[in-house]
Image (cartoon, rainbow, N blue to C red):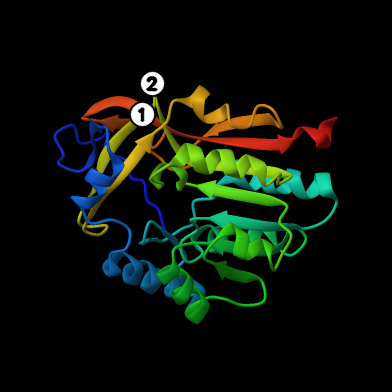
Amino acid sequence: MFKLFSSSKSKKSPYGWFGNYSNWDDLMNSVDGYSSVNILNKTKDALLQVKEGTAVYERDSVLFDQIIHPFPLLTCLFKSAATLKRPLHIIDFGGSLGSTYFQTKHLLGNDICASWNIVEQEHYVAAGKEHFEDDHLKFFSSIEACLQVQKIDLILLSGSVQYLPEPHLFLEKLAGYNFDFIVFDRTAFHQGKQDRLTLQIVPPEIYKAAYPAWFFHEESFLNHFISDYTIMCDFTSYVAGESLMDIDHQPVGYDKGFYLVQKSRYA
């Protein structure tokens, strides 16, 4: 499970993204990260309400009274299914307990999505299997574990890559899987000339946590995919306030998405 929130409306807020750090491990060792049980429990409780129909929509463990539709993502999924002329088998990398799945399922249906497979940390996988898994929604602890069970057409990475300790090693490996389609959504970039490692401090009304978070240099990020993929489109975050985000109270960061398609599909 991976989170983003906007701090741009509160210039003096103690919450948001701060610093320009050089070492992930040192920063990670100094704060509470994603393994905190309170984050899992709050997310689980919120999504169980969505699953049971007593709540409408959950994002970042917070419940909302109406769904905010991620239309750029939906467009990518519909286009991919149309290209293949069949429903998609999807990996949702870092997909929590099914936040995006429950957000989009009523618009996608079985004609677009054949299976939704979430790759997450072990404790999320255990909770997902116990409370949410069914014939359509599955949970795995790695991409490899999922691929042993199901051939995947499209991988979605929404607000997740920026929370990996070695994101460029992961991106290089991701390109090597040769998925037909890759969708990045809610991915953090900034205006600097190289990646920037920050400390993200979450407002306590969401949950009490702090963890390292990358803001990427856009060109370096995309260089992993230029040999084998065509960038069909890019798009801003559907979440209000994420198109411009503060680092150290300066509006230099932004969330963005990309839709990548194997060049062989358009050769």
Please name the residue shown 61% across and 70% down the image.
137
Q: Are marks 1 and 2 in contact (CB under 8 Å)?
A: yes
Q: Is residue 29 left or right of residue 127?
A: left
Quadrant position of residue 194: top left
Quarter of the image that includes the C terminus: top right
The image's mark for residue 191 is 2
Relative to 106, say whether 28 is above or below. Answer: above
Residue at screen point 82% across, 37% down: 265
Q: Position of residue 230 (x, y in %)?
A: 71, 29
Work out which residue is located at the far top of the displayed protein and give it: 193
Q: Is residue 251 left or right of residue 127?
A: left
Which element type, helix, strand or loop, lies under badge 2? loop
* Residue 256 x/y as whole percent: 49, 34
Q: Residue at x 37, y 51 (%)?
A: 3
Q: Name the disc covering residue 77, or none.
A: none
Task: Give amino acid for label 1.
Answer: Gly
Q: Position of residue 121 (x, y in %)?
A: 44, 63
SS at badge 1: strand
Front residue of 125/46: it is 125
What residue is drawn where x is 48% and y is 37%?
A: 168
Residue 244 locus on image (x, y percent): 37, 30
State the residue position of label 1: 253
- At label 2, which amino acid type do we have? Gln
The answer to whether 166 appears left or right of 151 in the picture is left
